[in-house]
Image: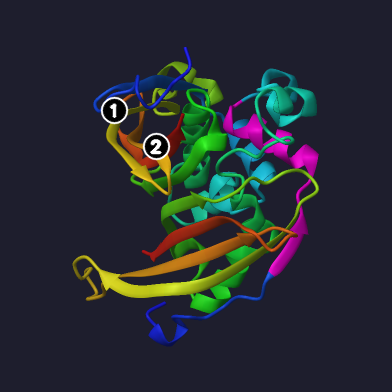
Amino acid sequence: MTITYDNINIGDPIPTYTSAAITRTHLVRYAGASGDFNPLHHDETFIKMIGMDNVIAHGMFIMGIAGEAITSWITHKNLRKFHARFLSMTEPVDRDNVENTKQRATIIVTGKVVKKYEENGEKRIQCDIIAKDLLGSRKLDGFFIVALP
Amino acid sequence: MVDKSKIGFEFPAYTMVVEKAKIAEFAAAVALKDSKNEIDPIYYDEEAAKQAGYKGIPVPPTFMTSFFFWADGLMRIMKALDVDLSKLLHSEEEYEYFGDIYPGDVITSKMKVVEMYERGKRDRIGRFVNVTVLETEIINQRGELVVKVRSTMIER
């Protein structure tokens, strides 16, 4: 069904989006794709040097996953604004301990419509969005605005 | 990073061409896919993109972050703000979209420091958290502002 301004209401949820469990390989792929080669995201020797336990995902990677959640629901040519606030770090799954680490590395994105309004001659909606891991830890929150027919 | 004289500082403009293969690579990365064949075809197939209502292959919503890194952005802000890598944290990011970006577009990024302030409680050695807000205008080859980026960085 095409999503239109008239058939969407304040409080309506956006479809829940669940990522695969993030691996170190996913982090390296994102590093190459984005050009962000901060060693924090792939080099365990650097991590140990600065007293951390594990490499962590790029905040922008989690925002990218949230962007994928949005565009798998609504065509992004109508996206007008996308805002994210980074709340906590995300550690990838350990290949040698998948059962105990996959939950911290799996991202669930949820959201809901919070505003309907007209601006610049367009009908627009604003949706709150939140990304958590499967343990309930909040990774990112924010909002996005789309124009609807 | 508390050096408020840096407010208004403009980084040198950086111009680059949007590469088609980099779009598919980015789309695969954020979808956690191993191959471009598993992603939405609008990101690699021009016909699929046109059928979906685009003039050409579009970019994912956060793709502009790659312009920052290709412009050596991290090094440039570390130098300009005099902060080292292990202390710099990305706190917020916002994109405001005014137009589309397609493969072959020649994109110029103009980044400047728009705000610097201290927030929160003093830490154990008596400092506040230093906040720097960067604004980047993403302009295409026709001089059109296509995206405005607002990035908030903190020094921990």
User: CB under 8 Å between callouts 2 and 1?
Assistant: no
The one nearer the camera, A19 or A120, is: A120
Marks 2 and 1 share the same chain: yes
Res B110 label = none
Please say whether residue B30 is one of the residues in the magenta stretch. Answer: yes
Which residue does the numbered mark 1 point to in the structure image? Answer: A136
- Give residue B123's position: percent from left, percent from top: 23, 68
Q: Magenta part of the protein: which range?
A: B14-32
Q: Quadrant of residue A90?
A: top left
Residue A100 coordinates in the image, percent (x, y): 40, 20
The Cα–Cα distance between marks 2 and 1, rounded to whole angstroms, is 34 Å
Residue type marked 2: Lys
| SS for dot 1 | loop
Residue B2, magenta (yes or no): no
Residue where numbered disc 2 is placed:
A123
Q: Mark 2 or mark 1, which is nearer to you?
A: 2
- The structure residue drawn at horizontal position 35% and vertical position 23%, both measured from the top left corner, is A6
Task: Classify mark 1: residues with Cα within 10 Å, few (<14), some (14-19) or many (20+).
Answer: few
**Can residue A36 be seen at all in this image of the molecule?**
no
In the rendered image, the vertical position of residue A26 relative to residue B92, given as above or below:
above
